[in-house]
Image: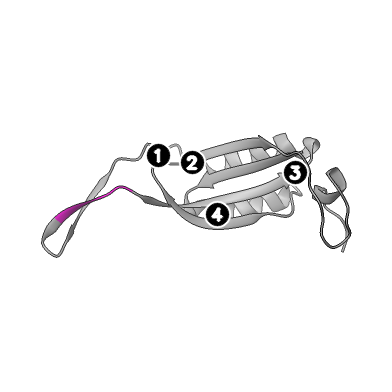
Amino acid sequence: MKLIKAIIRPEKLSDVLKALYQAEVRGLTVSRVQGHGGELEAVETYRGMSVKMALVEKVVIEIGVSEPFVDVTVKAVMNAARTGDVGDGKIFVLPVDAVHRIRTAERDQAAVTPVAS
């Protein structure tokens, strides 16, 4: 089992969600965050003073998947989020020791693999 954390541009969120849905990847969390990567710092004027804007708006998508879904998920995010410009983001694939589904008490792979409702 893995936790996939993708940091992407906010304007690419709908494209990524569509790609994940088409790849049959279900169950995710989306958070709006601020961060700084390789983008150039923007300088803005605020009340007559120049201010460096060091943080950029981003979106983090967290997806818990079983091993067969890792490559499918990474490829879907990579293809949908890429613009080719600096600031497209990163994808982290992290190991997960255990997962518990609260509703059914299922564990591990059964808890992260999509089920019929």
Contact, mark 1 vs mark 3 (Cβ under 8 Å): no
Q: In the picture provided, is 92 more to the left or to the right than 49?
A: right
What's the residue at 48%, 41% (across, down)?
Answer: 89
Q: How many marks?
A: 4
Per the image, label 2 sits on a secondary structure element best described as strand
Residue 37 numbered tag: 1
- Whether the magenta-drawn stretch holds residue 51 is answered as yes
Query: Which one is closest to the eye, mark 3 or mark 2?
Result: 3
Q: In the picture provided, is 83 more to the left or to the right than 30?
A: left
Mark earlier in primary sequence (4, 1): 4
Contact, mark 1 vs mark 2 (Cβ under 8 Å): yes
Q: Dot 3 corresponds to which residue?
A: 65
Per the image, label 4 sits on a secondary structure element best described as helix
Residue 80 in view in this figure: no
Which residues fall within the magenta stretch? 50-54
Residue 13 numbered tag: 4
Cα distance, mark 1 to mark 3? 26 Å
Disc 1 residue crowd, few under 14, some 14–19, many 20+, Cα 10 Å:
some
Mark earlier in primary sequence (4, 3): 4
Query: Which one is closest to the eye, mark 1 or mark 2?
Result: 1
Mark earlier in primary sequence (1, 2): 1
Q: Position of residue 74 (x, y in %)?
A: 65, 38
Name which residue type carries label 2: Gly
Per the image, label 1 sits on a secondary structure element best described as loop
Mark earlier in primary sequence (1, 3): 1
Q: Position of residue 41 (x, y in %)?
A: 28, 44
| Residue 105 picture quarter | bottom right
Q: In the picture provided, is 78 more to the left or to the right than 66?
A: left
Q: Is residue 47 above or below residue 1?
A: below
Contact, mark 4 vs mark 1 (Cβ under 8 Å): no
Q: Dot 2 corresponds to which residue?
A: 89
Residue 105 numbered tag: none
